[in-house]
Image (tube, grey):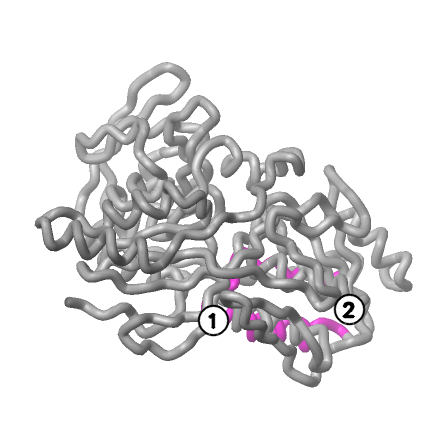
């Protein structure tokens, strides 16, 4: 039996594997409600689609349920003994439990999932999500990817992958079909504006840049964090150090689905001089996350958020907001604040089950609630942020 990768996966979850893996903390995320080919969607249906598109706050998820770890492991073991799929049996128990963030990976899925921690994966370069009509829809296409070169567009409906009909499948299962070895072809049957299309594309090793920095003509530095993959926290710190002294910063966390908690804490540390970032509990056992000392505590700061701001991104926003370090501008965040813990099952699959929640420095639980911005803004959000910075004594 293969052991689990000895690295953390996305998600707020202390790693407490039955086979003695080192305790590690990371954040659960679907890498957006639309899953990148190689990252995994936990959220299905219209709520998921709405979350990344700034849907009404009422469509955010409610408090997650929990699944019994022993019951899940027992179901898997019994299925394996009968020559059946342990993963399938475990997933049935998780689904019945009401644990909306619980899921089960097989070995290859978990290994592929771990790849995303470095901002790389093998695939064709699309985000997929379940549309409101129940079909699988292309949400976004990565520029320069095989999908982009083949002419795929946001809004295309995906009908089949290599002859496998995808309508009715979970997004994660569709993503699994799109994955494979770099260089291998995959045939996609799509529908666009009522017409059927067939495209053959070759999978590639793809990468994304989690942090980008630009300086506006008015002198404001905008730091966009797409996700908290490995190295992103230090890139935020470097961007803050490189920004001209005294000038304002906009930390853009819109559409950020989360990532590694260590990277999130490092990013928050860029604007804090030590102190509390968050607390979290695992089956009632409370633990604490602290910022590193030496961050810039005087530079005016605005954090941009929206309905796609999730998990680790919410942890950063909540810490900066509660400690009076940043003004949050935008719309209410998604509300993903539950803790998952992975357990290896008898057939090598991995079950991730909700075991607790995390809280901001002021003690707020964000799970199912999200963060309400200090300054609500729908359109021209970045310009609104610059106006707020002006009120803080920065800007033209």
What span is in magenta? 220-244
In the rendering, which numbered label is found on residue 180? none
Q: Residue furthest left?
A: 83
Residue, disc 2: 323
* Residue nearest the observer in this picture, 378 or 70: 70
Verify CB contact (< 8 Å) between mark 1 and mark 2.
no
Q: Position of residue 256 (x, y in %)?
A: 56, 53
Q: Residue furthest bottom?
A: 293
- At x 37%, y 31%, the residue is 136
In the image, is 121 to the left or to the right of 208? left
* Residue nearest the observer in this picture, 20 or 6: 20
In the image, is 353 to the left or to the right of 329? left
In the image, is 298 to the left or to the right of 310? right
Quadrant assignment, res 92: top left
- At x 29%, y 26%, the residue is 159
Residue, disc 1: 25
Q: Tell me if residue 327 is in the magenta stretch.
A: no
Q: Position of residue 355 (x, y in %)?
A: 47, 60
| Mark 2 residue crowding within 10 angstroms, few (<14) / some (14–19) / many (20+) | some
* Residue nearest the observer in this picture, 26 or 288: 288
Note whether residue 242 is visible: no
Residue at disc 1, secondary structure: strand
Residue at disc 2, secondary structure: loop
Q: Tell me if residue 233 is in the magenta stretch.
A: yes
Vertically, is 76 above or below 219?
Answer: above
Q: CA distance from mark 1 to mark 2?
A: 23 Å
Q: Position of residue 258 (x, y in %)?
A: 53, 57
Q: Upstream in the sequence, badge 1 or badge 2? A: 1
Vertically, is 2 above or below 328?
Answer: below
């Amino acid at each position: 039996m293969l052991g689990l990768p000895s690295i953390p996966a996305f998600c707020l979850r202390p790693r407490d594997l039955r086979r003695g893996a080192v305790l590690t903390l990371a954040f659960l995320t679907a890498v957006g409600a639309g899953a990148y080919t190689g990252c995994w969607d936990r959220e299905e249906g219209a709520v998921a689609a709405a979350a990344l598109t700034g849907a009404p706050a009422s469509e955010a998820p409610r408090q997650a349920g929990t699944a019994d770890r022993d019951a899940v492991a027992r179901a898997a073991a019994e299925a394996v003994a009968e020559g059946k799929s342990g993963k399938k049996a475990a997933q049935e128990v998780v689904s019945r439990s009401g644990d909306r963030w619980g899921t089960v990976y097989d070995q290859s899925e978990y290994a592929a999932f771990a790849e995303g921690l470095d901002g790389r994966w093998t695939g064709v370069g699309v985000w997929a999500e379940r549309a409101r009509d129940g079909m699988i829809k292309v949400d976004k296409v990565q520029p320069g990817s095989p999908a982009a070169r083949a002419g795929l567009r946001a809004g295309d409906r995906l009908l089949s992958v290599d002859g496998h009909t995808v309508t009715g499948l979970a997004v994660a299962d569709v993503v699994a079909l799109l994955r494979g070895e770099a260089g291998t072809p995959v045939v996609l049957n799509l529908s666009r504006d009522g017409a059927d299309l067939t495209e053959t594309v070759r999978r590639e090793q793809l990468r994304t840049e989690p942090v980008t920095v630009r300086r506006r003509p008015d002198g404001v530095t905008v730091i966009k964090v797409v996700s908290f993959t490995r190295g992103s926290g230090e890139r935020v710190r470097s961007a803050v150090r490189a920004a001209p002294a005294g000038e304002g910063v906009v930390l853009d966390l819109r559409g950020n689905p989360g990532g590694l908690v260590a990277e999130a804490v490092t990013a928050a540390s860029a604007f804090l001089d030590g102190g509390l970032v968050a607390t979290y509990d695992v089956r009632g056992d409370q633990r604490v996350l602290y910022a590193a000392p030496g961050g810039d505590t005087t530079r005016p700061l605005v954090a941009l958020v929206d309905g796609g701001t999730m998990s680790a991104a919410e942890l950063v926003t909540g810490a900066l907001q509660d400690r009076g370090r940043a003004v949050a501008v935008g719309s209410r965040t998604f509300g993903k604040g539950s803790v998952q813990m992975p357990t290896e099952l008898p057939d090598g699959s991995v079950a991730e089950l909700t075991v607790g929640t995390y809280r901001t420095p002021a003690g707020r639980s964000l799970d199912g609630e999200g963060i309400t911005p200090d300054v609500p803004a729908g359109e021209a959000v970045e310009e609104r942020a610059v106006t707020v910075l002006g009120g803080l004594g920065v800007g033209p």
